[in-house]
Amino acid sequence: CTCFAVGLLPLDVEMPVDSPCLLGIFSEPLRAFPKPQAFLPTPALCRDAAVSGRGAARLEALLASLDASRTSGFSASGEEEEGAASRGKEATYGELSAEGMVQLLTGWPDPFPLGAASLLVDVGSGVGKLLFAAALLTQSRGRGVEYVEARAALAERALAAAARDGFLTADEAARVELLHADGTAPGVLQGATHVYMANLCFPDELNVAMVAALAALPTLRCVATLRRLPLEEAWPDDAAACSLAAVEERPVGMSWADNVGVTYYCCEKET
């Protein structure tokens, strides 16, 4: 069968009929089934909280509504804001694809999957898409931290519209917190168990500052980044957080490429 992840990218793999993981398909129905559905080929996407067809369909509808309303971080560069000239490459915008969101949300290494006790913080959250997906597909809480004011304002409007129009339930919307803030500022990351940073364009000094901010989090369990963190150089000896180690690298879909490596750092042992 031809399989699709969130109805976007063909995977073209043969799967056994008794595969345990199902995802809604939004193109041509598979003739072998009475309802449109397809198999996800990777166990990593099936583990812990498999994405149901209904959840995938809701995610696609939510993202389509954002596209229809032209809610895009690409159009909100923030270049017109005061101080933008000194902001640098860290304000460069890119985002996870729909498939990439599913890959990231379901791909956290054992024994630290996202759950009801988790707080996922997205540093550089843009218009909030990953946080909306997390609220829809998991039971975790989410916090978006966006430095560019125009994007942060778009995210607030998008969250209100998603709740108003029924793309997110009241409970799901209540689990999303959006901040216009600097991720290195004291208290901004407080309570985070999982942190995602699309830090590919962060300058070295910002990556060092983010390591210091992460080290201050006693609740921290895992961090996912697009660029390797300078842990050996910047991790303090008196860190409140657990000792992080690079666990693995996995590909996720991004707006500029289908297979961008994400490095996962997790506690070396559960505390």
Image: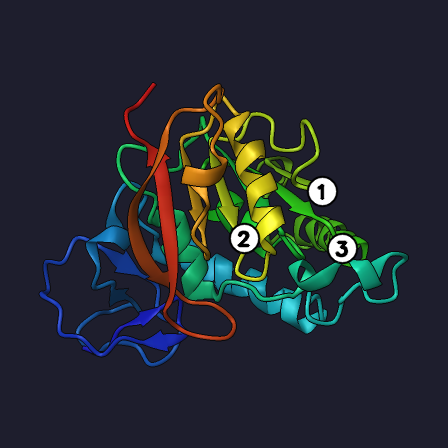
Distance Cα–Cα, label 1 vs label 2 = 18 Å
Image location (x, y in percent) of residue 197: 53, 50
Regarding residue 54, the answer to whether it shows in the image is: no
Q: Residues within 10 Å of mark 2 (few under 14, many from 20)?
A: many
| 76 lies left or right of 95 | right
Q: Residue type at mark 1: give it.
A: Asp
Distance Cα–Cα, label 1 vs label 3 = 9 Å
Circles 1, 2 touching at the beta carbon (< 8 Å): no
- Reading the image, the residue beneath label 1 is 182
Task: Name the secondary structure under disc 1.
Answer: loop
Mark 1 or mark 2: which is in front? 1
Judged from this view, the residue extending furthest toward the front is 233
Task: Name the secondary structure under disc 2.
Answer: helix
Label whose residue precedes the other's in the sequence (3 or 2) = 2
Task: Name the secondary structure under disc 3.
Answer: loop
Distance Cα–Cα, label 3 vs label 2 = 17 Å
- Reading the image, the residue beneath label 2 is 130
Image location (x, y in percent) of residue 129: 59, 56
